[in-house]
Amino acid sequence: MASRVTLCMLLVAAVGQAAERPWPPTADKVGIMLTVERLYWRPALPGMPSEIKFAALEGNPLESGPFTIRLALQAGQRMPWHRYPEPIRMTVLSGALAMGMEGRELSAGGFFACPAQQPQSYVARDASVVQISGMGPWRIAYVNPQDDPRGTAGSK
């Protein structure tokens, strides 16, 4: 009997680890405190190049409401000219980004606040991590429809 209980516990633990982790809550519902080790890196958000990974720190960016995410970019990773329908705030946590606006570069600690619909582009000079806060649901539109990795301009 004890071996059956142990087996069931092991199966439940294995299934729990294999299951998709839930999205974190928003700070208006509960306090949030995360360590770097607890971040769960997911495949790219819809409309982002597939090489970009992200971790949700607060909220689900695919739903209405506030969210905070981190993006991990490889050295040389490009984000072609694009815009968001809502304002965003971006902080470079590590690495450096060459921003398409006015040829500026943001290194670790740099901050960028972008109004809704403002075109922007960047290239990761080094392997970089950036943190973005905004209001969901996450949507991105490319200035040049051929740059859209989803293959159809304007799709969500």
Image: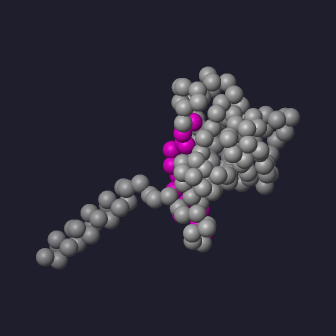
Q: Looking at the figure, which quarter contains the N terminus?
A: bottom left
Q: Nearer the viewer, residue 90 or 108?
A: 90
**Residue at 75%, 34% in the rendered image:** 119
Colour setting: one colour
User: Vertically, is 12 above or below 99?
Assistant: below
Residue 34 x %, y % = 59, 67
Q: Please, which residue is most extreme toward the bottom here?
A: 2
**Residue at 63%, 57% in the rendered image:** 66
Q: Please, which residue is most extreme toward the top here?
A: 146
User: Vertically, is 5 above or below 44?
Assistant: below
Q: Nearer the viewer, residue 58 or 3?
A: 58
User: Vertically, is 152 above or below 3?
Assistant: above
Instruction: Using residue 79 as the reference point, say whether residue 12 is left or right of it.
Output: left
Query: Which stretch appears magenta?
Result: 33-47
Q: Is residue 141 visible?
A: yes
Q: Main secondary structure of the magenta part?
A: loop
Q: Looking at the figure, which quarter contains the C terminus?
A: top right
Residue 67 x %, y % = 62, 55
Residue 40 x %, y % = 51, 56
**Residue at 73%, 38% in the rendered image:** 117
Instruction: Using residue 106 as the reference point, say whether residue 47 is left or right of it.
Output: left
Task: Tell me, yes or no, whether the highlighted magenta stretch contains residue 54.
Answer: no
Count of all numbered marks drawn on residues in the image? 0
Residue 24 x %, y % = 53, 61
Q: Quadrant of residue 77?
A: top right
Q: Nearer the viewer, residue 84 or 103?
A: 84
Instruction: Using residue 150 as the reference point, say whether residue 69 is left or right of it.
Output: right
Q: Is residue 76 visible?
A: no
Task: Tell me, yes or no, whether the highlighted magenta stretch contains residue 44.
Answer: yes
